[in-house]
């Protein structure tokens, strides 16, 4: 190999390393972004490594710590009661909470309540085949008595998405409705159902939906 080729390879390697460093440095490691990475299938260790690399070139962001990553899994608040069913043990509740898309999860003897950011589709499809969406912060309260699981299917790569559909006494509300623009508020009101009898619980990518359904507090 000539000296010229060796020099060119060395220059190319340096350029690739610089580009890689810049890429890592620009990674968003906010709590919202961490939740997005986890939902897309990245492991906690992978996200931690990405954010540590990002923080090494600038000041360390506190939201890049493993503690912040773990915080993207909803905090479970369980209040024991005297109603029919007893609450599951802590491990079961943690596994269930880690399977669904939620910021907070509160469980008592009567209800299961969780809050999450979500979007709803409306209108006609555009030229790309997608319908426009409007987003908000949703609170969902599900009564445990009479709650049924209609479908619990794990996702299969590009063949099908995961599916977790329940039926029961369900109440929903938009917590940030007054913060939305007039246009988005009108769009959301057209598609939002406050008391759906059948409802799909959104799950994290890679979650074991069947196992989550088994541990659904009922």
Image: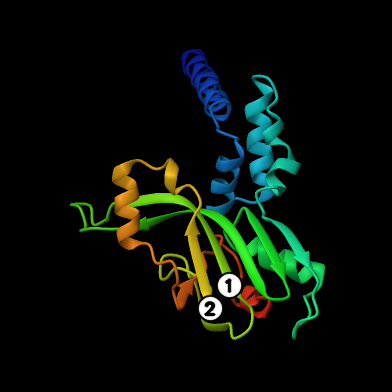
Name the residue located 20 percent from the left edge and 53 percent from the top edge.
126
Front-most of 169 and 131? Answer: 169
Q: Quadrant of the C terminus?
A: bottom right
Name the residue located 65 percent from the left edge and 49 percent from the top edge.
72
> Answer yes or no: do the residues labelled 2 and 1 have beta carbons within 8 Å?
yes
The correct choice, above or below, for 102 with respect to 152 in the image is above
In the picture provided, is 139 more to the left or to the right than 190?
right
Where is residue 129 drawn, in percent x and y? Answer: 23, 57
Name the residue located 65 percent from the left edge and 72 percent from the top edge.
111
Between the residue at mark 2 and the residue at mark 1, the CA separation in whole angstroms equals 6 Å
Residue neighbourhood size for the residue with mark 1, other residues' Cα within 10 Å, grouped as few (<14), some (14–19), many (≥20): many
Local SS, label 1: strand
Is residue 39 among the parts visible in the rendering?
A: yes
The correct choice, above or below, for 39 with respect to 29 in the image is below
**Residue 142 bears which disc, if any?**
1
In the picture provided, is 25 more to the left or to the right than 4?
right
The correct choice, above or below, for 55 with respect to 133 in the image is above
Which residue matches tag 2? 169
- Quadrant position of residue 180: top left
Local SS, label 2: loop
**Residue 15 bears which disc, if any?**
none
Is residue 121 among the parts visible in the rendering?
A: no
Name the residue located 64 percent from the left edge and 79 percent from the top edge.
144
Front-most of 27 and 130? Answer: 130
Front-most of 51 and 213? Answer: 213
The correct choice, above or below, for 36 with respect to 192 in the image is above
| Colour scheme employed for the rendering of this structure | rainbow
Where is residue 120 drawn, in percent x and y? Answer: 37, 57
């Amino acid at each position: 190999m000539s000296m010229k080729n060796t020099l060119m390879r060395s220059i190319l390697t340096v350029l690739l390393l610089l580009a890689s460093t810049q890429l890592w440095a620009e990674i968003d490691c906010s709590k919202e972004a961490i939740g997005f990475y986890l939902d897309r299938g990245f492991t906690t260790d992978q996200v931690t490594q990405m954010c540590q690399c990002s923080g090494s070139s600038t000041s360390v962001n506190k939201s890049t710590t493993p503690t912040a990553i773990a915080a993207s899994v909803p905090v479970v608040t369980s209040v024991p009661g005297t109603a029919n069913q007893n609450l599951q043990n802590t491990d079961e509740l943690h596994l269930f909470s880690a399977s669904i898309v939620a910021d907070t999860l509160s469980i008592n003897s009567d209800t299961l309540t969780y809050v999450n950011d979500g979007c709803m589709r409306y209108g006609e499809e555009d030229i790309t085949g997608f319908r426009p969406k409007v987003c908000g912060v949703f609170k969902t309260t599900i009564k445990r008595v009479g709650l049924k699981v209609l479908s619990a299917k794990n996702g299969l790569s590009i063949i099908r998405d995961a599916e977790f559909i329940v039926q029961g006494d369900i109440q929903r509300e938009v917590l940030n409705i007054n913060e939305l623009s007039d246009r988005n508020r009108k769009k959301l009101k057209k598609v939002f159902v406050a008391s759906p009898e059948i409802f799909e619980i959104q799950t994290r990518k890679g979650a074991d939906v069947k196992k989550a359904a088994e541990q659904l507090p009922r």
